[in-house]
Image (cartoon, rainbow, N blue to C red):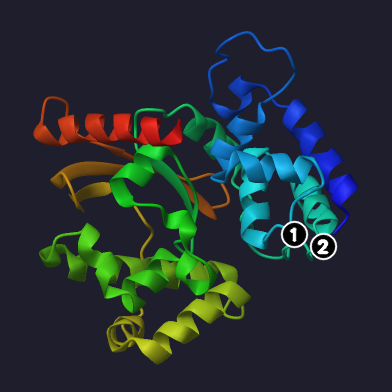
Amino acid sequence: MDRAQLADFLRRRREALQPSDVGLGDGARRRTPGLRREEVAMLAGMSVDYVSRLEQQRATQPSEQMLTALTRALRLTLDERDHLYRLAGHNPPDRQGMTDLVHPTLLRILDRLHDTPAMVIDDLGTTLVQNPAAQALLGDDLRFEGLDRSQVHRWFTHPEGRDVYPPEDHDHQSRTQVAALRLAMGRRGAQDPRGRAIVDDLLRRSPEFRTLWELHDVAERVGEDKRIVHPELGLIEVTCQIMTPNDDSQRLLVFTATPGTPSAEKLDLLAVIGRQAFA
C-alpha cells in the first residue's frame, strides 16, 4: 500500500468532480474546488473520518469492497480504478467478461433520480449501486459480500430475504431469477468464473434451484408490476421499469407507483426517509 500516492490520487480525483457530476446540488458557495470529503463519504457509504484518514495517509488498508465504493463515488474509469487498487495494495479486478464498473449512461440517469427508487444490477443479479430511495424500499444490498452479492444466490440460500415479496409471489420470482441466470450464463459462457461459482454453489445447496435449473428455461429480465412488502409500511404495489445499455451486462431498475394511490404515498414517504439517511 502506497499511502502517499493513494492519498494524493483520491484528493485529486475528488477535486476534479463537481457536485452536478454526481447528481448533487451546488449548495452554498464553495471555497475549494470539487467535492467535499463528506460528499464523497455519502456517495461511497463510508464515514467521513475514514475518507479523511485516507487522504491524510493515516488509514489502514482499505478493503476491496471499499475500493469498489470509492470507484463509483469518484466516477473512476477502468484505468483509474486499476490504479486505485494497485496503490491500495490489491490486485485490480479481472477485466475479462463483465465488470462491476457501472455503465456511465446508467449512472448519469441514476444521479438524477432523487425521489424515485432506482438501482443498477448486473446480469448475475449483483447490485452495483442503489440510490437512497431504493435502499429505503428494499434494504441495503451493497452490504453483502462474496457469492451473496448476487440477489439470485441470496434468494435460494437465505430464505429470510424472500420476505420482501408476498409468499404467493415466491414461485414466480424463483422461476424468473433462474431463467434470467440461465440467459446470462449463455451470454457469458459456461466457464465464466463468477457465474459458474454461483451456479455450482446453488446446485449443491438448493434442491429448489436444482429443479428449476434442470428445466432450462431462459428469459430476459423485463419490466413488470411487483408487490413489495416493506417492514414498516406494509404492501407497496410498484411498476419496475428496466433500462439496458447495448451490451446487456447491466440494467437500471426504476420503481414507480400509480399517482394518487396509497402505494405512491408510501413511495413518497420512503423518498424522504432515503434523503434523510443520505444526508
Q: Which residue bears the numbered disc 2? A: 89
Where is residue 84? Give x, y as percent.
79, 51
Classify mark 1: helix, strand or loop. loop
Does residue 44 appear anywhere in the picture? yes
Compared to residue 267, the image places residue 35 above or below, namely: above
Asked where in the image residue 151 lies, by quadrant, the reply is: bottom left
Are there few (<14), some (14-19), or many (20+) residues within 10 Å of tag 2?
some
Considering depth in this image, is 135 or 237 the residue closer to the camera? 135
Q: Which residue bears the numbered disc 1? A: 61
Nearer the camera: disc 1 or disc 2: 1
Considering depth in this image, is 278 or 74 the residue closer to the camera? 278
Please indicate whether residue 135 sits to the left or right of residue 112 in the image: left
Classify mark 2: helix, strand or loop. loop
Q: Which residue is drawn at 54% across and 71% down?
A: 146
Looking at the rendered structure, the number of numbered marks drawn on it comes to 2
Compared to residue 193, the image places residue 243 above or below, namely: above
| Residue contact at pointers 1 and 2, CB within 8 angstroms | yes
Are there few (<14), some (14-19), or many (20+) residues within 10 Å of tag 1?
some
Considering depth in this image, is 14 or 77 the residue closer to the camera? 14
Where is residue 28? Give x, y as percent.
58, 10
Asked where in the image residue 141 lies, by quadrant, the reply is: bottom left
Considering depth in this image, is 64 or 254 the residue closer to the camera? 64
Where is residue 243? Give x, y as percent.
43, 42
Q: Residue at x 79, y 35 (%)?
A: 11
Does residue 223 appear anywhere in the picture? no
Q: Quick one: quadrant of the N terminus?
A: bottom right
**Most distant residue in the top direction:** 29
Please state which amino acid type lies under the numbered disc 1. Answer: Gln
Compared to residue 72, the image places residue 174 above or below, namely: below
